[in-house]
Image: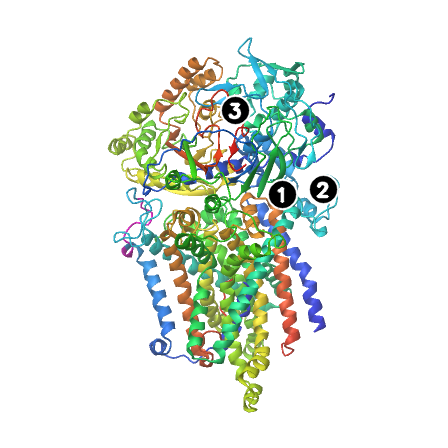
Amino acid sequence: MEDSNYWTRLNSRKVSRRALLGGGATAALGGAAALMVGCSGGGNGGADCVATPTARPFGTPKAGGTITQGRLIAALGIDPHIDLTGLDVDTLIYPYLYGWAPGREEAIFNNLALALEQPEETEFIFSLRPGVTNSPTGGGKPNPAAGEEITSEDVKQSFIRRGTSITAPDRRFPRKIAGSSDPGALEAALLTPDKYTFRFKMSEPFVPGVREMANPTWGIVSAKVLDEYLYLSQDAFGAGPFMLEEFRGNERIVLRRNPNYYIKGRPYLDGLTYVVITEPSSLYSAFKQGQHDVNGSVLTRKDYEELACDPDFTVATTPSLFYPVVHLKIKPPFDDIRVREALNISVDRDEIIAVINSGEGNYNGPIQWPQTFWALPQEELRAFYKYEPERAKQLLAEAGYEGGFDVKMKLPKITGATFIADTALLLKDQWARVGVNIQIDEVELGAYIGSTLLPGNFEMTFFPNLPYDEPDRPLSFYHSLGVTGSGNWNNYSNPELDKLIDAQSKEFDKDKRQKIILEAQRMILKAHGPQLTLTGGQQYSARWSYVHFPFELGQDPGADVNPNGSDTWTEKA
Amino acid sequence: MAQEAAIPIAATEEARPARSRIKKLLSLVRHQPLGALGLAIVVGFVACAVFAEWIAPYDPQKINVDALRAAPSWSHPFGTDRLGRDVLSRTVFGARISLMIGLVSVIIGTTMGTVFGVISGYFGKLIDSIIQRLIDVMLAFPPVVLLLVIITVIGDEDSAFRKFLTEHTPVPEGTFLGVPVFLDIFVIAVGIGIAVSVGTARVVRGAVLSLKENVYIEAAQAMGASDRRIMMKHIFPNVAALVVVLATIFLPIAILAEAAISFLGIGVPDPTPSWGADLSGPNRQDAISGGIWWVVFFPGLALSLVVLAFNLIGDAFRDLSDPRLRGGGGPGGGGSRGGF
Amino acid sequence: MREYIIRRLLLVPLIMFGVSLLTFMAFRIIPGDAAVLICQFNCTPEVLRDIREDLGLDEPWYQQYGEWLGVLKNDDGELSGVLEADFGDSFFTKLPVSEELGRRLPVTLELMIMAMVLSILLGIPPGVLSAVRPGSFADLVARFTSVLWLSIPAFYLGILVITFGGKWFGWSPPNFGTGKTTGFLEDPWLNIQTFFWPALVLSVGIAAVLMRLTRSSMLEVMRNDYIRTAWSKGLKERAVVWRHALKNAMIPVVTILGLQVGALIGGSVIIESVFGLNGMGIYLLESILRRDLLVVQSLVLIFAVTHVLANLTVDLTYAWLDPRIRYG
């Protein structure tokens, strides 16, 4: 493998690079935001029984059978390193180094890596599992690496590809490994002493990288496959539990069991089909009619309550990691901390929970509350964000805005994601009570990102952040360099805070890191902005009861869990 | 709007000797009860639009945490939506948006169309050819597709057109004439207006062509009257009646067009009550999967009623002009809604 | 006459050129483009530039337009474009647009054809009946129905059907919410059921137009001398109505039917989104929102060609059927 850099090989082939661009991350955002739609459930749930997550025994698994799952978002592509709309599918097709237990914030070594050795904090030595074998076919075509093991060289090539992909959501980690953004440096930093050992040493400590390697974008693809296929957006050849049979990302995605899978007898299922329907009510109707075994639509609290009382269905609920925030531009009137505080305490967060989060939700600090290990305690947040409209008026008067002021709030317009506009309406309503009049201005998502958010072209904007599951990213929005390193959108700068944010990304000790992160959040709280954090709710899921999952949405999967999808089984085998 | 373009030429021939307006109205009620009913409905909706603040029991944007998705009751006759907003109030205010867009777009559309039609017909030759080919191109788009394209292009947040409006014209951005986000509404009206103007221009040009044959135009030209004067003094007054007829035909179509594009999610933005927008998105999902029927039923009913009223009035006019064909029809009187 | 036909035919390519150029320019002057949607939050100017370059959005517009048409060479040095029915690839899925069209065209076509058939069945017989007995109870009902149908927007009717079907009967349209449209050969009965409801909803407005036109046209024809002669010759009513009057009355009706193709195309955009049919209309709407320009251009062009050809056919047929019409 002389000419091993992926992009060099690609360019040497003189093929239009057009093929390599992923289907927009924004589409992912749109879709992900659409998942919030249902969270504004009605307050009038009329169910007779008490809606609780159904606890079903996992039972004795039966092999065989297929399940169909609804999907609200079209998957524009399923290349793990490039596309962002098909990541859930990628986790079924490709092996990963390891999994992650969200509550415990720990790696689970249930996948390609047998163990991780860290002689130093920044040095990672993975011993790989022998016998993780590539599927015979993918999408009806022969797998170029059919029957072959995944080796350290494959891991290396996948890391290089992921680390240099234009559309990858975050490339800070590979840069911290390489010490620069040069693909050659990354290649030199990744070592493969033997077939089953993969090692590297970060040139600079970057703790979030540990979590990141378990993310769906870090799928391990055979080097042979990468050699043969320039991009894997519409093709897939992996060594995960399933293999692709048919990919029509805006209609259906059909997966078959990978007969070469390294765990004997897994996956239980013979196949898994995703059916894409982008209209939420149609999707839900298909689930209830039994055309889908697993619901893909967004459930409202009301749907959830109804289903919970019907033994035919199994339901689960988990806190949603979405954290809509209001960005304030640090210029008049928002450069005055009294004005920011006034806005903060004139938001009635309980009312938002009642209307937008179906009555089930918590206050969000700078890190959203479901990240329990990193977030500030709920009591502290609730005490801090007390609803005090009278004091808010007083603060405004002190700041020279007696009686309030007018301001324009920009919103992204995302089809299907009603909660954005709904929350904005509620805020408008609440702030009007203290005299702050918001004029809502909805902007088409593409234009919003390009010409409103990124250039910081707003006075005030309401934005649904992606559901980051690591504290570093949410904090980086407050860093004066921002997430891209080229500055944040709010013009907010606090050197003390920057130091803390930098420090936490270098602190490998979990407890010490937690302390720094809590301190940073308290500092942000006191500054009242530049983002006003609101609330976070629950998301609900449902399936027909004959489908069994090894663990429910939001539960700790436990240590002996197998990779995604391999333990799922159905009684209808 | 190709099909509409073909319709109204005949309408000019219907110009009847003027009768007194009151007499006309009386005879309308006597002989055309349905037409009178239509008129009454339209008057009712106009009243809603003008006096919405007094008629609607609540603020249409007022959120009510204590009554989310409430079924119709005495306090909320049409129920409430997912934010506890009163559906009756939203429907009443929706009339304002709907009629405002209908009116503005028809005024803009027929004005633009008349100007182009008169110029095209009067000058003929190269100017005529250019304008007519342009119209051919516009008419080649199916109406809904044309609207989608126009609205996307001029309605974009940073479109040159919006910039022009905010920087060089007095069109207000905020609340104006009781309409919130007036600029957005205006842009949509212009979009629909452009579509309307295409049909208008073609029909007006036809009428101008036949007018030009008249001796008095030639006489005016011989006397050295300027083109501008001839168009203003001799041509325009003679097509004015036709333009009014066209406007009445396009008005309900424009209202439907607004509802359709708002339904498709590119029209009036959500907080502003619009019948079309209220039929889509979260309301539609509530209705279909949650059985919350009232959030879509009433706005749609209002929309249908307005269109029905205009159709009844149109039928009545046609009947009066040709009683033999009583009951709909008349020359090209199929009525049309441009695919909405 | 021949000259007229030739002139009309020659105009078609010119109009198509205008349509494609107009659509092309329109979507290139608006600020948000697909590159911004693709690049999202890591968007540094460099990344954005790379992506624009990859999508070919950095080239001057005439180059892009020429490549799309297939008269200028693209990056790979090939000449391939719309003129050879190569519509290019979607910016997002990278799949050829023609592949997507191959799947979606049948859906929209079947919807439109079925709607057309239903509107003829629903519109013309009642129209004839009400013209034969003007003023009768049947006439009254027909007239009232037609004006009602004319006034209910299709998207409202569609939502009512789905909402109340579910609420009162626990029913929903076959295949609703599955995104599937069973192929006719696969299961003819299910296929027809799938399309029946959306087509019915779409047809109602057109049926109303046809009904009203049939009625007025019949009334007009029945007043003609030759019909009076037929009556006076003592011919049976059936023969008069069906053999003599209807044939002549259908001329304007056929015309309007052709002109409704534009309405059908627009209607299908809306109805597909109401009933969740994966046809061309939904595709257009999604692509416009995503700024997937090649797809938008291609779809608009296809719709416009269909529309123009339908109108042309109508005009020519009309000229042929009714030689009194002169064209200036």
Q: How many labels does the image show?
A: 3
Instruction: Find the distance from the CA under tag 1 to the CA under tag 3.
Output: 32 Å
Q: Is mark 3 on a helix, strand or loop?
A: loop
Quadrant containing the N terminus of chain A in the rendered view = top right
Q: What type is the residue that disc 2 sits on?
A: Asn
| Extreme residue in the bottom direction | C233
Residue stretch rendered in magenta on the structure = B54-63
Q: What kind of residue is marked 3? A: Gly
Tell me the residue that label 3 is attached to.
A485
Q: In the rendered structure, the residue with mark 1 lies on which chain?
A: C
Residue B238 located within the stretch drawn in magenta: no
User: What is the distance, in whole Å, between disc 2 and disc 1 at their CAs?
Assistant: 15 Å
Dot 2 alpha-carbon crowd within 10 angstroms: few under 14, some 14 to 19, many 20 or more? some
In the displayed structure, C311 sits above or below A176; it is: below
Q: Is residue B118 above or below residue A357?
A: below
Q: Which chain carries label 3?
A: A
Can residue B332 be seen here? The reply is no
Can you tell which quarter of the image residue C168 is in? bottom left
Q: Which amino acid does label 1 sit on?
A: Ser
- Mark 2 — residue? C74
Considering the numbered disc 2 on the image, is that residue within a helix, a strand or a loop?
A: loop
Q: Nearer the viewer, residue A480 or A54?
A: A54
In the image, residue A353 above or below residue C203? above
Magenta stretch: dominant secondary structure: loop
The residues tagged by marks 2 and 3 sit, at their Cα atoms, a distance apart of 36 Å
Q: Name the residue under label 1.
A: C90
Q: Is A459 in front, or is A141?
A: A141
Q: Which of marks 1 and 3 is in front?
A: 1
Which chain does the residue under circle 2 lie in?
Answer: C
Q: Where residue A550 sits in the image (x, y, percent)? A: 48, 28
